[in-house]
């Protein structure tokens, strides 16, 4: 699922091979330094980051046991109620995480470019967010962008699903965890998307097409791939792996997918290069996200010269998949240029154009002004503080609660290692129509492409 396609990918339509960044691998600073050498060590920042990491993990741990654990019978009795309630608790925990990142760890998340579409209303939209993967913390900081991101289901590596507490909560909330095996990963994506569309009639997905974070080894692999396929060398991003992106696009089809969010993340001062950076306090003061909202109608669904189609030598589905791969590659060339210009500036001047307010339920946000908690931010933080204290108190005084505490953990461990995760279990109980069948390798109940439909300029069901 995460391997580069074997075929040679040409430069996308509309892009010249004379790209405005080097293709010979020689640049003054090919990768922004993880920690600028002039950043002083700050003991206070270290303590705040360590405390913040502990609070995030502890709250996820007791929250999954106390709140999600008691709801598990609903996954059988009322799957829709289970899904909605778990989503509510996980969203509340993400609001707590936003508070910890913004106030305790003192990391400001800034939003540039287009706004996210509002989530309220009678016509929620199916969306797909694609983002470059600069560090292991990109998705965590991204929750600071507010409710729109906090409702998305992130596609992550499977090891994260095994984290006690946080992993269990993300499983229950229908996050997607990949093993990096094509057949298994396609089946998992299809199952979760089927579950979400079956219960909500829409879904919002968040993926990293690069497949891994940018580091010295991954950049070398990316540029080796570029050399083999006559593509430009990249220095601020990795060449995207199109297989997963194309699969999701085809799975959703034009009948469901309404918008693609093209998001670029950048760190103006410190790049937290390793997972241990959080415990060392090596964290940025700000994280910048540039957002482009692209209507799904602008994707290259069927923009081919129908007169050139010959049923004997053209596979229409393969042709569309190649166009989608080219489209994705073009977005990454744009990211590379955007980040190149961004990192040319001194750290204190780095920002994207068109800053907009973060759609936060936790903070009142104005650019360059301190963060102030909203009423919902105060109430949510108070709820988690009181709940944490009651959780500890219950463990201390009640043997019934201690038994419940042990049993629920055993259930989560069993679901994780024997059932493929709580998301797999919930899908089985919901009994929703499955879009993807791993036995037939075909899409069901999704638009399919045929030669006749290409000639008529449309899709057929």
Image (spheres, grey):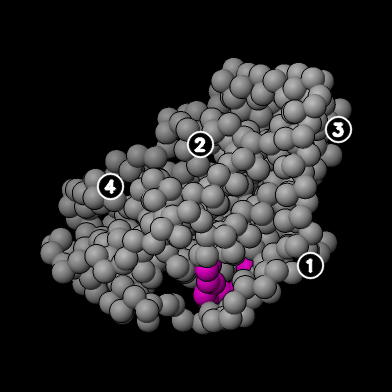
For residue 218, which numbered disc appears in the image?
Answer: 4
Measuring from the top left, give residue 52's x and y in whole percent.
55, 51
Q: Is residue 368 magenta?
A: no
Measuring from the top left, give residue 451's x and y in whole percent.
51, 48
Q: CA distance from mark 1 to mark 4?
A: 43 Å
- Between disc 1 and disc 3, whose residue precedes? 3
Q: Is 449 placed left or right of 409 in the picture?
A: left
For residue 78, which numbered disc appears in the image?
Answer: 3
The residue that disc 2 covers is: 160
Q: Are marks 1 and 4 in contact (CB under 8 Å)?
A: no
Answer with the quarter of the image where residue 335 lies.
bottom left
Q: Is 325 placed left or right of 158 in the picture?
A: left
The residue that disc 1 covers is: 375
Identify the residue shown where x is 35% and y is 48%.
274
- Between disc 4 and disc 2, whose residue precedes? 2
Q: Which portion, as a residue range, is magenta?
A: 108-117
Q: Nearer the viewer, residue 24 or 12?
A: 24
């Amino acid at each position: 699922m995460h391997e580069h396609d074997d075929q040679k990918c040409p430069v996308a339509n509309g892009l010249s091979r004379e790209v405005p960044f080097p293709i010979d691998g020689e640049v003054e600073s090919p990768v922004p330094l993880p920690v600028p050498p002039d950043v002083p060590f700050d003991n206070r920042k270290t303590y705040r980051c360590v405390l913040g990491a502990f609070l995030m993990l502890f709250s996820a741990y007791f929250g999954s046991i106390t709140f999600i654990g008691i709801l598990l019978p609903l996954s059988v009795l009322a799957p829709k109620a289970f899904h909605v309630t778990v989503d509510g608790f996980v969203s509340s925990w993400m609001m707590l995480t936003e508070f910890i990142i913004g106030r305790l760890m003192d990391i400001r998340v800034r939003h540039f470019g287009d706004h996210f579409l509002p989530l309220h209303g009678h016509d929620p939209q199916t969306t797909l967010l694609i983002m470059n993967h600069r560090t292991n913390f990109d998705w965590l900081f991204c929750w600071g962008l507010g409710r729109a991101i906090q409702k998305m289901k992130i596609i992550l590596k499977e090891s994260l699903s095994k984290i006690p507490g946080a992993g269990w909560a993300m499983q229950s909330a229908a996050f997607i965890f990949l093993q990096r095996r094509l057949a298994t990963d396609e089946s998992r994506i299809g199952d979760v998307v089927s579950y979400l569309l079956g219960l909500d009639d829409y879904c919002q997905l968040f993926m990293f097409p690069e497949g891994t974070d940018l580091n010295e080894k991954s950049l070398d692999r990316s540029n080796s791939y570029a050399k083999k396929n006559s593509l430009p060398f990249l220095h601020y991003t990795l060449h995207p792996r199109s297989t997963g992106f194309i699969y999701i696009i085809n799975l959703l089809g034009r009948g469901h997918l309404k918008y693609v969010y093209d998001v670029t993340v950048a760190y103006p001062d410190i790049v937290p290069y390793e997972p241990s950076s959080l415990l060392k306090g090596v964290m940025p003061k700000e994280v910048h996200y540039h957002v482009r909202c692209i209507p799904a109608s602008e994707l290259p669904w069927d923009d081919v010269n129908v007169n050139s189609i010959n049923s004997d030598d053209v596979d229409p589905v393969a042709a569309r998949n190649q166009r989608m791969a080219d489209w994705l590659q073009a977005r990454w060339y744009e990211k590379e240029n955007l980040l190149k210009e961004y990192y040319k500036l001194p750290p204190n001047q780095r920002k994207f154009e068109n800053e907009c307010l973060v759609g936060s339920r936790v903070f009142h946000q104005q650019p360059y002004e301190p963060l102030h908690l909203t009423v919902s931010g105060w109430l949510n933080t108070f709820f988690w503080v009181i709940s944490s204290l009651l959780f500890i108190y219950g463990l201390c005084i009640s043997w019934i609660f201690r038994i419940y505490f042990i049993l629920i953990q055993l259930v989560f461990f069993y679901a994780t290692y024997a059932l493929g995760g709580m998301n797999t279990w919930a899908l089985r109980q919901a009994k929703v129509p499955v879009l993807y069948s791993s036995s037939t390798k075909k899409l069901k109940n999704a638009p399919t492409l045929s030669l006749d439909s290409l000639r008529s300029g449309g899709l057929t069901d």
